[in-house]
Image (cartoon, rainbow, N blue to C red):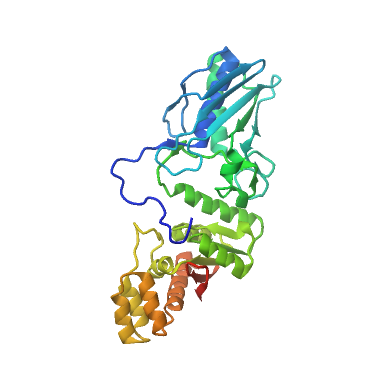
Amino acid sequence: MSDDAPSPPPGRPERPLRRGWTTGACATAAAKAAFQALATGAFPDPVTIRLPRGETPSFALCRATLGEGWACASIVKDAGDDPDVTHGAEVAAMLRALPSGAGLRFTAGAGVGTVTLPGLPIPPGEPAINPVPRRMMREALAEVSQRCGRAADVEIEISVPGGEALARKTWNPRLGIVGGLSILGTTGIVVPFSCAAWIHSIRSGIDVAKAAGLQHVAGSTGNTSEDAVRKRHALPDIALLDMGDFAGGLLKYLREHPIPRLTIAGGFAKMTKLAQGALDLHSSRSEVDLRFLSALAAPRQGVAAEAIGRANTAAEALQIAEKSGIPLAHLVAKKARAVASATLSGAPVSVDVLIVDRDGRILAEA
């Protein structure tokens, strides 16, 4: 992601966007199919599961193999119209019979990560299979157990071929999840272009930073600003929060879960939106008000301020200001900092703002 690249959605779709399924839903379907094969000798195909909100989707099997005391089934994840890095990935469940009374155990196979840092819903040392998918699998196996009369004394190993490479495109390395992807989902459904997953990642990043005892975190709108703030403050990776356009999501969570210092970094246009009071910085939900920039510049130089108000873009307004000796980026940074501080509503968080150009140079700091 770059500071100038728009976040999804790119515009209004011409048709309703198709929903998809989380990795947790796919893992549950695969585990249920494999356990039914262990219990009956036959795989259900398609396999139907119940999601936390009561929906009952069916999944076609990709692979199904049965051996002595074990069964393996897999599902190809369909994320619908969401730009999910795991769309098309194969989610497999290998079930191995355990001694009577052993209960159900979860393990991470190839492509599924292991938690190494505190602050996540799963403790360090455990496979990165989140609580809701674990509950879904327990309930799915309990249903088969009740129907088929076989106790769910099994080990469930979830794997995602190629998952380690896919995980490098996610927050997992920063969150201390090593070796692969997380098995996620609270509803089982992927809502296209939903901000929920991004907000979840921001919150998880804050939780991990707090658990690590960090005193300073940074929320950046993109890679360029993130690189600049990393160099400026020598912050470790787990302190760098990919805020994207969701300044409000970052600030509101920090309001309830404060960390002593926050740096917000982004390009001039995005920080202008924040200075105007917008907490969602996406181009489809907020826009730069050139009159606002003109008003900021007016006390400095009236003629140039009028030209700023007639500019075509925020970038042109900044160029006019720079040629006229008006510290417009600094004025915007101060206003953005004031908005961020007001949103924190007195939480014990000290805020500073960096404005960065496309080459990563810091234009202003407040």
Tell me, yes or no, if residue 274 can be seen here: yes
Q: State the residue in front, 143 or 322.
A: 322
Q: Position of residue 127 (x, y in %)?
A: 64, 38
Apparent side of residue 45 relative to residue 121 in the rendered image (left or right)? left
Of the pair 293 and 186, the residue shown nearer to us: 293
How far from the left and from the top, in percent, is residue 56?
42, 27
Q: At 51% across and 31% down in the image, what residue appears? A: 26
User: Residue 142, can we see it?
Assistant: no
Which residue corresponds to the image point at 44% horizontal and 60% vertical from the top-left? 248
Q: Position of residue 298 (x, y in %)?
A: 34, 83
| Residue at 57% over, 21% down | 34
Indicate the position of residue 135 as horizontal and vertical percent values.
55, 33
Nearer to me, 201 or 359: 359
Q: Is residue 288 left or right of residue 142?
A: left
Answer above or below: position of 120 versus 263. Answer: above
Extreme residue toward the right, this view: 99
